[in-house]
Image (spheres, rainbow, N blue to C red):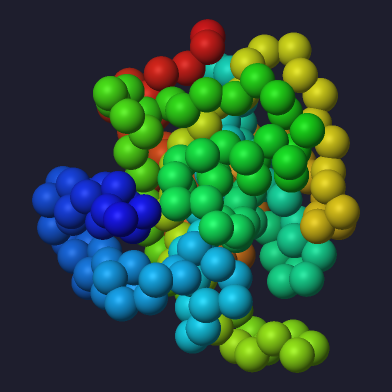
Amino acid sequence: MHRKPLLDLLVRYRASHPDEAACADRIRALVETQRDCFERRCFPGHVTASAWVLSPDGKRFLLTHHRKLDRWLQLGGHADGEADVAAVALREAREESGLAGLRFAWAADAPMPVDLDVHRIPARGSEPAHHHHDVRFVLVAAPGQTIFASDESTALEWFEMDALEDVADDDSVLRLGLKVRRLLAASALQLFA
């Protein structure tokens, strides 16, 4: 079953983050009950993946100012049928930033998410309001690259880690950034510098 790897990932995440069991269980319920959970046509929600992108030395983070949602957000998007959420996060980060040299920063045998989030997306045009069941990873950019904003963004910008609270106007983005900051402080992420 193409959903099994994500279900296994959610079990591992839940075991290491018992305080986030409700969110992990909510995503698991969607994945277990919706065969097309990786397709954007799956309503009332579908799986997405995103990435918190760090500079090579971990001192800055990259956010996109999302054109449709008019907010600063981490890079990411729809799975579009891809069941490997880590691959989705990497693809979306590359597409939305122009950065080809990215790697997973989490020091583990296989990419592990650093956060999970279920958030509401408002209705737009013929698309009804729905939920994104987002699986979030940390990526680090290789040195010497230039960023390029995609058509989905009005801006793409590097921010200093100590500016997180000033930039993140969304609770889930702030929570994700704070988790990454704690991992950096604990030297739990693999950087280039």
User: x and y percent of residue 31 in the render?
Assistant: 34, 68
Outermost residue toward the front in this view: 1
Residue 165 in sight in this render: no
What residue appears at the point 49 percent right and 63 percent down from the top-left corner?
A: 38
Q: How many marks?
A: 0
46 w.r.t. 98: above or below: below
Is 35 left or right of 186, judged from the image as shown? right
Quadrant the N terminus occupies: bottom left
What residue appears at the point 81 percent right and 64 percent down from the top-left corner?
A: 67
Residue 159: image quadrant is: top right
Q: Nearer the viewer, residue 178 or 155?
A: 155
45 w.r.t. 61: above or below: below
Residue 77: image quadrant is: bottom right
189 w.r.t. 122: above or below: above
What residue appears at the point 58 percent right and 18 percent down from the top-left corner?
A: 56
Residue 45 in sight in this render: yes
Q: Nearer the viewer, residue 109 or 3?
A: 3
146 w.r.t. 132: above or below: above
User: x and y percent of residue 185 in the render?
Assistant: 35, 28
Is 184 left or right of 51, judged from the image as shown? left
User: x and y percent of residue 169 in the render?
Assistant: 60, 65
User: x and y percent of residue 19 in the render?
Assistant: 17, 61
What residue appears at the point 22 percent right and 50 percent down from the top-left corner?
A: 8
